[in-house]
Amino acid sequence: MEVLVSIIVPIYNASKTIEKTINSVLDQSYTNFELIAIDDCSTDNSFEILEKLSSEDNRIILYRNSKNLGVAKTRNIGIDIARGEFISFLDSDDIWKVSKLEKQLKYIRQKNAHICYTSYEMISNDGTNSGLRCVPKEINHTRLLKENVICLSTTIVKSYVLKKYPFQTEFFHEDFVLWLELLRSGYKAVGIQEYLVIYRKGGRSSDKLKAGMNRWVVYRKSEKLSLVLSTYYLINYIINGMKKYYLS
């Protein structure tokens, strides 16, 4: 019997993109999933769009927060709700290729891993192509400190891991903190180099100065690195960011 996959999609004012995002899940070649869509008190018509979609497909489980909680706490609610053996995350403006789940489930079992991520295409807010990100076949804690190659919308994770290690909500880069914690704890992460996700650039990480400052907070407060090591990894982060910019 095919295992159940829980897909967690937090939504806040995503009326322009959410239908395409949800449909990219509904169109997956792997069909045994529950799509947990959690509206974080949107002020546009996102919830109405979700209501329509959920009325047409019973795999969509629709929730609405009683107050705005932010994306990390909303994802943790999804983790608590999830019934699947695996959990995937999808941001409300990103899109999956049709074989994404099918290929990842096969690969994560083949490699006996806990986390699987993929390469991804990038688009700008107007939908134009903005570059490609090819990921390494495997990543360890030390290498991840230099550059976060794991895009959240590309991931699938064994559910029991996330039930034990939910997102730490006090950090801005909560997904980066999570991957570091899991790798430091001995969990295995592997990458598929095929481009299976379309990622929309912008959002919370578009302010590079703020992103760099928040990265420093991760190094010092979450990872508890020394001043010297934090500086070393921040320099690597800046260099890799410049490479991405010029390559794009």
Image (cartoon, rainbow, N blue to C red):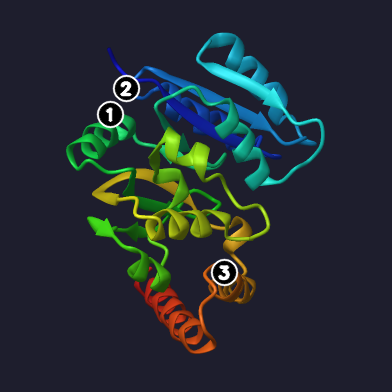
Q: Secondary structure at mark 2?
A: loop
Q: Position of residue 49 (x, y in %)?
A: 66, 23
Image quadrant assignment for residue 160: top left
Q: As displayed, is residue 29 above or below residue 223?
A: above
Q: Is residue 104 left or right of residue 170?
A: left
89 vs 3, nearest the viewer: 3
Is residue 90 among what the camera can see?
Answer: no
- Location of the N terminus by quadrant is top left
- Contact (CB < 8 A) between labels 2 and 1? yes
Q: Secondary structure at mark 3?
A: helix
Residue linked to disc 2: 30
Q: Earlier in the sequence, mark 2 or mark 3?
A: 2
Identified by mark 1, the residue type is Glu
Identified by mark 2, the residue type is Tyr
Image quadrant assignment for residue 241: bottom left
Q: Calculate the distance from the C-alpha at mark 2 to the C-alpha at mark 1.
A: 5 Å
Q: Earlier in the sequence, mark 1 or mark 3?
A: 1
Q: Position of residue 119 (x, y in %)?
A: 31, 51
User: Going by the picture, which residue comes out furthest to the bottom?
Assistant: 228
Q: Which mark is residue 218?
A: 3
Query: Which class describes the residues within 10 Å of circle 2: few (<14), some (14-19), or many (20+)?
Result: some
Residue at the image position 66 percent from the left and 34 percent from the top = 15
- Location of the C terminus by quadrant is bottom left
Q: Secondary structure at mark 1?
A: helix
Q: Position of residue 93 (x, y in %)?
A: 55, 42
Query: Which class describes the residues within 10 Å of circle 3: few (<14), some (14-19), or many (20+)?
Result: many
Residue linked to disc 1: 102
Counting the numbered discs, the total is 3
Q: Calculate the distance from the C-alpha at mark 2 to the C-alpha at mark 3.
A: 36 Å
